[in-house]
Amino acid sequence: MNRSIGSRLDRSISGSGSGSGGGGEGGGGGAAVDFLQLDVCDAPRGGLSEWLARQIRSAIADGRLAVGSRLPATRTLAGDLRVSRGVVTEAYRRLTEDGHVAGRGRAGTVVVAVPHVAKPAAPRIPAAALHASAAAPRTASTVVREKDRGGSSAAALPGLFTAPPDLGVFDAIRSAPARIDLSPGLPDLAAFPRAAWLRAERSVLAGLSPSDFGYGDPRGTPALRTAVAHWLSRYRGIPADPDDVMIVNGTAQALRLLVDVLRADGISEVAVEEPGSLGVRQHLRPLGTPPVPVDAHGIRVDALRATGAPAVLLTPAHQFPTGVVLGGERRRELMDWARDGGLVIEDDYDAEHRYDRPAVPALRALLPEHVCYAGSVSKLLAPALRLGWLLAPAAYRDALVDAKRLIDLGSAALPQLVLADLMESGGLERHLRLIRKHHRRRRDAMIAAIREHLPGAVVHGAAAGLHLMITFGAEERAAGQEGAEDAKDAVLADAALAHGVKVHPLSWHTQRPHPPGIVLGYAASGTAEIAEGVAVLGRLVQALSPHRAADTDTDTGTGTGTGTGTGTGNAPRLQLSSEALP
């Protein structure tokens, strides 16, 4: 076979001279290299240095080589390209004279400036497209995109909470700047056990064989499935076999896997708690999510039966967002409903965080063949780990494993093995004891701040978890004006963000009209930040209340605040409107 014809890689690049070593612009056989995917065969004859300088200049202009990037050493790049070192040296000299790179001694040659490139004129947008854009609904993600174009301050985000929440809403919240973050859902991230994690990681790496770095079981590593089974037996009362456990990328992936499997099984609706997590409802799309009311004892099973839904998603150990614990009588009613053919999806998202008494046993411990149980370390260690577990009835187990296999072939093995080491060595248990103390202290600080700055607010739920729910407006509810107050808490959340405090409006987590309220996370902030953030909320509630002046003028004594403690004067009623923003 004649390889001399049609082969670009074998084509000789020669300059004024000849020879295999190549000097000046001459060279031997050309080569393609990893750096910028350069291929010497693309260079014009006799112009290697100019071609190389032009390729690097183009890469700097379009961002492939950012300012601060280090170029390869001249000897290394010349060897890779199979050209003389003088070719590369000359190219770097030209870039240096242009001011795009500079020599830094032992640090090598570094990109220092981006070439100016004239931008092409923006394409003309048809008028119909402009009208369609103007007519599109303004969502929370739209608000953040507008902020990115117009500024970075929280004041540049009006309407983040009052705009309809779309799928990108939680990304929008996380990216919104704020001095104090009281949004729910985060543990004390500063307490992440870095030293223990590093020790466990070194220990794991030292013991791995080459085959351990290959593809594994889509259900997860045997080590972590065994450790999770032991953990659940010890802390959640669930007798589990490692074969029952499937490792997932957090509860979010567990829900998506369940959606696919349940739809294939003919289930089109999963009832949800009301109020209940907006994020959960998003993950359950496209299934229907009929709301079932929650009261002081948990979900109302009679209302669940009335929906006719074949499945329900619950947070029984610490309901989100109300914080109530599913009572004993309701548990018995729920068990009867499940035995009649219902399926329970149990989201056990923060059950380990109980401060006044042991956590109640998981529903999975009572009805293993009627409960899909999901848990994770997102609220225990950090959500960035993306590690969780799913235990399903035998009827769904194989289908879930198949779904997991098709999505990602299994979660990353190394973090699984490190977590297994922490669980089995007692490191995770020690961390849990530590952060329980932190979280309890911060919860107490938040309740004290609410008593002082929001005396008319009602705090809901048990002494557990990572968040509190507070509601306002008892007088309006008693007067039958509940509907008029629906979603006004979003105005308060917008005002709080404009003043540097991030919270969730309760209306985000409801599908039906509900008294205004706020969901506050306390685990990830210090006590001083918590006190300051709640004080800001208190001032905003006063400022946004149209009855503030009347309440101040008529108050002559001491009144009792509703719910959390004793307040001075009449508690302000939350009558919010967007026009009232300070």
Image (cartoon, rainbow, N blue to C red):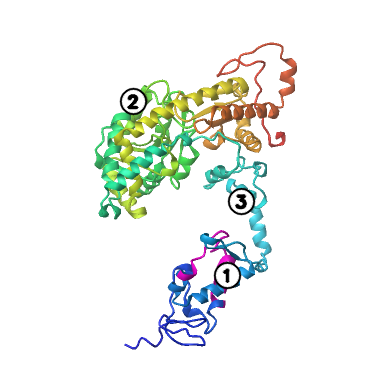
Label 3 sits on what residue type? Arg
| Mark 3 Cα shell of 10 Å, populated few (<14), some (14-19), many (≥20) | few
The residue located at (61%, 66%) in the rendering is 100
Amino acid tagged 2? Arg
Quadrant of the rendering where the N terminus is positioned: bottom left
Q: Nearer the viewer, residue 559 or 77?
A: 77
Q: SS class of the residue under badge 3?
A: helix
Determine which residue is flagged by label 3: 145
Residue at mark 3 to residue at mark 1: CA–CA distance: 29 Å
Considering only order in the chain, which callout, 2 or 1, is on the residue closer to the N terminus? 1
Q: Which mark is residue 332?
A: 2
Quadrant of the rendered image containing residue 65: bottom right
Residue at the disc numbered 1 = 58
Kindly report which numbered mark, 3 or 1, lies closer to the viewer in this rendering: 1
Ranked by sequence position, the earlier of labels 3 and 1 is 1
Please rate how many residues cluster around mark 2, counting C-alpha atoms within 10 Å: few if below 14, some from 14 to 19, many from 20.
few
* Above/below status of 162 relative to 52: above
Q: Which numbered disc flags the more N-terminal residue, 2 or 3?
A: 3
Q: Given the image, on which type of amino acid does mark 1 rest?
A: Ser
Label 3 close to label 1 by CB (< 8 Å): no
Horizontal and vertical percent for residue 466? 47, 30
Work out whether residue 79 or residue 128 is closer to the camera in this orientation and state it. Answer: 79
The answer to whether marks 1 and 2 mark residues whose Cβ atoms lie closer than 8 Å is no
- Extent of the magenta region: 50-75
Q: Residue 487: horizontal and vertical position, in percent?
A: 60, 35
Image check: 366 left or right of 472? left
